[in-house]
Image: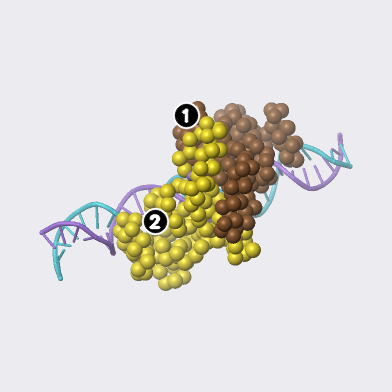
Chain colours: A brown, B yellow, C cyan, D purple
Amino acid sequence: MKQATRTLLRQYNLRITQSRSLVLQAMLSTKTPLTHKEIHRKILKTDGSISLVTVYRILEAYENIGLVHRHLSTGSFILCSLQGEKGHHVMLSCQDCGTVAECIDKDFCKHEDRIAKSAGFSPKAHLSELIGICSSCS
Amino acid sequence: MKQATRTLLRQYNLRITQSRSLVLQAMLSTKTPLTHKEIHRKILKTDGSISLVTVYRILEAYENIGLVHRHLSTGSFILCSLQGEKGHHVMLSCQDCGTVAECIDKDFCKHEDRIAKSAGFSPKAHLSELIGICSSCS
DNA sequence: AATTTAAATGCAAAATATTTGCATTTAGAA
DNA sequence: TTCTAAATGCAAATATTTTGCATTTAAATT
Ligand SMILES: [Mn+2]
Ligand SMILES: [Mn+2]
Ligand SMILES: [Zn+2]
Ligand SMILES: [Zn+2]
C-alpha cells in the first residue's frame, strides 16, 4: 500500500484500508476526472482487487468529506488537489486533454460576493468551472 | 397549447409539438430545477400526456440548443432565463427554497479570464453556481 | 384542402447505473 | 491476541437511460 495514500487517509481521519488506498492511487495517477467504473477498471488492471459497490461507497465518503470533487460538466470524480475552504473552488477544465486543475482564488470569492449582493443573494459557497484550453494544449 | 411556449419554440426554430409545449409549460411554472421524472410527473398531473422517453429526448434537444441548463450540483434542469452568450452564465442557487436565478455578468467573465490567464489557461466558457440564500429567503 | 415526407412520439425491451440486505472479513483499539 | 464496529463483497433489487421499430404528426407542397 502506497505511503502517500496512507498519509492522505490518516489526514482525513479515515480507516486505512486496501480498497480506500487503491481508489486513491487510481485517482492520484491522473489529472482527468474518472467515473466509478473507470476507477474500478483501472484498479483491476493494476492487479488490485475491489468491488464496484465498494468504489461507490468509497467515493461517496470521499465526496462528503471533500477529499474528491465531482467534475461539474461530466459528473465524474477528481481528487481535490487543494484543501482550501471547502466549497470555494474553481476548476480549469481542458476541452482538449480533459485535464482538470483546481484553484482557490480569494479575489474570485470577493467578486462573487459583489455579483451576489447586487441580486440580494448571500453566497455560502461556489462551484465554478472554466472550460477552455490548458497551457500545455495551447 | 400555451402561446408563450409556441413563441419560444418558434424562436428556437423547433417544431411546435404538443410534447415540447408541455415540457416548456412545466418548466416555465417553476424557478426550481426539475429532473426528467419530475417534469414527467408534473405534466401528467396537469392532464397532459407524454412519455418519459420523450421527456428525455426533448430535454436533450433543449440542452443542446441552450434553451435549458443543467443545475450543476443536482443535475436537474432549469429553463434558461437569459439568452446571453451561451456558456457564460452564473446561477444563484438558494439552499433554502431551491430557486435558481441566472445572471450574466461581463465583469465576472473578465475576472475569470484573469484567473485563467495566470494559469496559462484560455477559457471559452464557464459554468458557475453560487450557493447560498436568496433575497426572499433572507 | 388534400397529399407527402421527414421528424417526433410511444411502447416495449434492452442496457446501464445505483442501491440494498446480509454474511464475511478486516482495521485498529483494548 | 482478542474483540468489535466498520468495511467489504456478493447477489439481487431498483432506478435510470437508451434503443429499435411501428405509428403519428407538423408543416411544407401541391
Ligand atoms: Mn467563494
Ligand atoms: Mn465567461
Ligand atoms: Zn489540455
Ligand atoms: Zn430562497
Quadrant location of the N terminus of chain A in the rendered image: top right
- Whether residue A133 sits left or right of residue B15 in the image: it is right
Label 1 sits on a secondary structure element that is loop
Give the amino acid type for the residue marked by disc 1 in the picture. Answer: Cys
Nearer the observer, disc 2 or disc 1? 1
Q: Read off the chain for label 2.
A: B
Taking the spot 61% from the left edge, 43% from the top edge, the residue there is: A107
| Residue highlighted by disc 2 | B58
| Label 2 near ligand 2 (CB < 8 Å) | no
* Residue A94 in view, yes or no: yes
Q: Residues within 10 Å of mark 2 (few under 14, many from 20)?
A: some
Viewer-side residue, A24 vs A105: A105
Q: Position of residue A133 (x, y in %)?
A: 47, 34
The answer to which of A29 and B137 lies nearer the viewer is B137
Which chain letter goes with mark 1?
A
Residue at 63% from the left image edge and 50% from the top image edge: A125
Residue position for label 1: A137
Up-down: is A35 above or below A123? above
At 41% from the left edge and 62% from the top edge, which residue is drawn? Answer: B23
The crowding category of the residue bearing disc 1, from other C-alpha atoms within 10 Å (few below 14, some 14 to 19, many at least 20), is: some
Q: Secondary structure at mark 2?
A: helix
How many discs mark residues in the rendered view? 2
B79, above or below B42, in the image: above
The answer to whether the beta carbon of the residue marked 1 is less than 8 Å from any atom of ligand 3 is yes
Query: How far apart, in angstroms, are the residues tagged by discs 2 and 1?
Result: 35 Å
The x and y percentages for residue C10 are 36, 62
Amino acid residing under circle 2: Ile
* Residue A1 visible in the picture: no
> Which label belongs to residue A79?
none
